[in-house]
Image (spheres, rainbow, N blue to C red):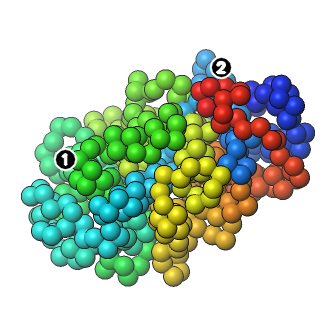
Amino acid sequence: MVFLLFQRNCFAQTGNYVPEMDTVDKSIMAFMQEWELPGASVAIAKDGKLIYARGFGYANLEHRELVQPFYRFRIASISKPLTSTAIFQLIDKGLLSLNASVFGPSGILNDTVFLDIIDKRYYDITIEELLSHTAGWRRYGNDKDPMFSSAMIADYFGSSLAASKQQIIRYMLKQQLDYTPGADQAYSNFGYCILGRVIEKISGETYEQYVKKNILNIIGASSFELGGTYESDKKENEVTYYDNPGAPAVPGYFDHQRVPAPYGGFDITAMDSHGGWIASAPDLLRFALSVDGRNSRMDVISEAAADSMKAKSFPSGSFAHGWISDEGGICHAGLLPGSSGYLVVRTDGLAIAVLFNSHSYKNDFFPAMSKAIWTSLRAVTSFPKSDFFEGTCDPRF
């Protein structure tokens, strides 16, 4: 496995190179080799300072292009904390409340197109339940998840185009809920699709416009952008995505032609508020540190909102509001065909973003990733002192 020692030169120039950090390099390389991952970007912050950012392996195998630390990856479901942050901002501004109803004549999404509801329990769904994955939907694989059923929903509406986000919601409003809102908890991409439309309705802006203007531009996280579905839609400094070695082509979401799963196996443009963003690993940390409720960097939500966001939302579950919460802090993983990632902010001041341009559906993939990172960091007794957020290494951070 070839990797780029980009940040090593920065440590040497500033006198802040810490040999113990080599354990992180070795651990990431070993993990990539074991899981056959072509490329990665890893960023680590300590007490609000970016102390480590490196690219490993290949951004593009065919051209032997190495990953740079500022390269952008699909972050998949790590998009959900960003959407949750926008919701809590609107709550801070007094424009929204957690117990606000979403559907029905008196709900937020009370446009005529959203009033054809079969199961009246939809009227009981609140913002809190969408955030906490308790709104009433279960999913059993992608055949059950409407966000991966674009072609089927487009056919339902007799459309020759991919199903829009509004059509997906309208389709689901004609289905029965799987359980009464608030009675259970089940991970739901669809719930976060709805939250994106709530943000648009309350703010009067597109979801992307609101998030960029009120969160990302404020913290200087300029690498964030909504991604495209096909390889021809790649943005500047975005990596190429690879399916598992030997994986077969899949039916395309639009015309049912056989395509590689990362490019046409799903419609990422419909996934904006639950899985549509691309970003660099350092910018993921910029974002995470702006909602952690600590004083190390400026926060974009109030301390009360940060506390509410991190609080567990269901007695037997680990989901908070846009995050997964445990005693060590908050985290979220992301997974799509051709991409995977992990973002964590710990109570001890450490924060880590890891992004890959491939994936695995094996159940032990993310636990193995987490173990590789934390095992290596436990060997570090002192950390670099410089803050590479300030551009001492590369202004594109």
> Residue 236's spot in the image, x, y percent?
49, 23
Tell me the residue at 85%/35% (across/down). 16
Amino acid type for the residue under numbered disc 1 = Asp
Q: Please, which residue is most extreme toward the top here?
A: 63
Q: Nearer the viewer, residue 161 or 306?
A: 306
Quarter of the image that includes the C terminus = top right
The answer to whether residue 113 is seen in the rendering is: yes
The residue that mark 2 highlights is 64
Tell me the residue at 40%/27% (across/down). 233
> Residue 297's spot in the image, x, y percent?
61, 49
Is 182 on the left or on the right of 329, as rendered?
Answer: left
The residue that mark 1 highlights is 155
Is 72 on the left or on the right of 32, as rendered?
Answer: left
> Residue 52's spot in the image, x, y percent?
74, 39
**391 up-or-down from 288: above or below:** above
Q: Nearer the viewer, residue 232 or 9?
A: 9
Q: Residues within 10 Å of mark 2 (few under 14, many from 20)?
A: few
The answer to whether residue 262 is seen in the rendering is: no
Quarter of the image that includes the N terminus = top right
Tell me the residue at 73%/49% (across/down). 46
Amino acid type for the residue under numbered disc 2 = Arg
Question: Which mark is nearer the camera, 1 or 2?
Answer: 2
